Image: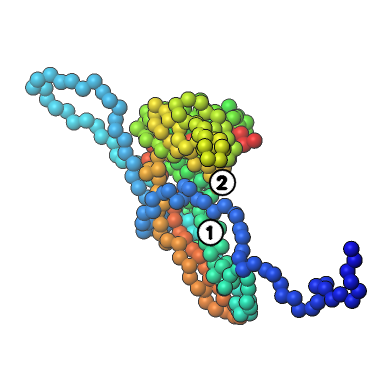
Amino acid sequence: MAQPINTFDTYDSVGIREDLQDVIYQISPEETPFYSASKKVKASNTLHEWQTDTLRASADNKHIEGDDTTSEARSATSRLGNYTQIFKNSVSIPDTDEAIKKAGRSAEIAYQTLKIAKEQKLDIEKALFANNARVAGNATTARELAGAPAWLVTNVNFQSGDSGADPTGDGTDARTDDDTPTDFTQAKFDATMQSIWSEGGKPDVCYLSAYQMDIALGFTGNNNQRSSVQAGDKKVVKSLDVYVTPWGTVEFAPTRENRGRDVFIMQSDMWCVGLLRPTKNTALAKTGDSTRRQVLTELTLVCKNEKASGIIADNTVS
């Protein structure tokens, strides 16, 4: 078929309005399971400190009648601390841009400020999981918080044959990664769980990457894996909610911001975030023909007692 002669079609027309949806689609991940699950406490100094203690080992405790009592030697508590880290992002939008009518958002400054707030939250999650030592900072060096791997020394599974080594455990140094990682296994997981239980911990969550989560899906026994059939749509759903062991029951939480080589088994209430300055969105001084806003958070990670958690380090990531 051919178009009739002199047909004035859309290709000839001038002034056709654009067809642009008044919505913006984005699927970038923004979940922060560790940061979100950690209780927020108030910090009042850039060095936030806390104390830990432990009971002595059980002993054969028996005495004769009338025996004189001798006081036992006592140990002092351990004093630990972590530095607050400043997370800061800002956006600047020309005032001309604010006057233009746009699709998907009414005000560019509001839209961009919301974006940087979400991005900053991801930065915080990454810092909490980072194998990073604390840094006191000075006039030319930014303060840094010590991430979770820098605190874990008791319940650990790592490769020491090449170069792997534990940190001191007080946040002053990071773990030493081994150059020859090995596969994450159920045996490693169970051994670490048993170690945590022996120390008195009650782990309830395991943070791990998608790759390590896929391995965990293959764990066997004790109701850790199940397949359920939904009669309505005839779909088979394979899921792994919790892993049940004699040493405790933990929920698996896949994460995107932790290092793929690290698997964390944690007692949630033994970790918290010390907030010196909670997240705040403020307007910056106007210095020209633009509007600027800043999103700032200052916080640190608190490991209340590292014996309640554990790490399986130096796992292969592919």
Q: Residues within 10 Å of mark 2 (few under 14, many from 20)?
A: some
User: x%, y% of residue 46?
Assistant: 42, 57
Q: Give the residue type that dot 2 points to.
A: Arg
As drawn, which residue projects farthest toward the top? Answer: 64
- Residue bearing the label numbered 1: 118
User: x%, y% of residue 290?
Assistant: 59, 77
Q: Nearer the viewer, residue 116 or 83?
A: 116
Q: Give the residue type that dot 1 points to.
A: Lys
Q: Is residue 318 left or right of residue 55?
A: right
Would you identify the image quadrant in which residue 214 lies? top right
Q: Residues within 10 Å of mark 1 (few under 14, many from 20)?
A: some
- In the rendered structure, which disc, 2 or 1, sits on the residue that comes first in sequence? 1
138 over 181 or under it: above or below: below
55 over 110 or under it: above or below: above
Which residue is at a point 37% across and 35% down the rendered structure image?
Answer: 202
- CB-based contact (under 8 Å), mark 2 and mark 1: no
Q: Secondary structure at mark 2?
A: loop
Which residue is at a point 86% across and 75% down the rendered structure image?
Answer: 7
Which residue is at a point 61% across and 80% down the rendered structure image?
Answer: 99
Q: Is residue 295 left or right of residue 94?
A: left
174 over 188 or under it: above or below: below
Q: Quadrant for the C terminus, please.
A: top right
- Residue bearing the label numbered 2: 256
37 over 99 or under it: above or below: above
User: x%, y% of residue 178?
Assistant: 59, 33
On the question of residue 154 being in view, the answer is no
Q: Nearer the viewer, residue 140 or 248?
A: 248
Which residue is at a point 53% across and 49% down the rendered structure image?
Answer: 126
Q: Quadrant for the N terminus, please.
A: bottom right
Task: Please tell me the numbered disc located at residue 209.
Answer: none
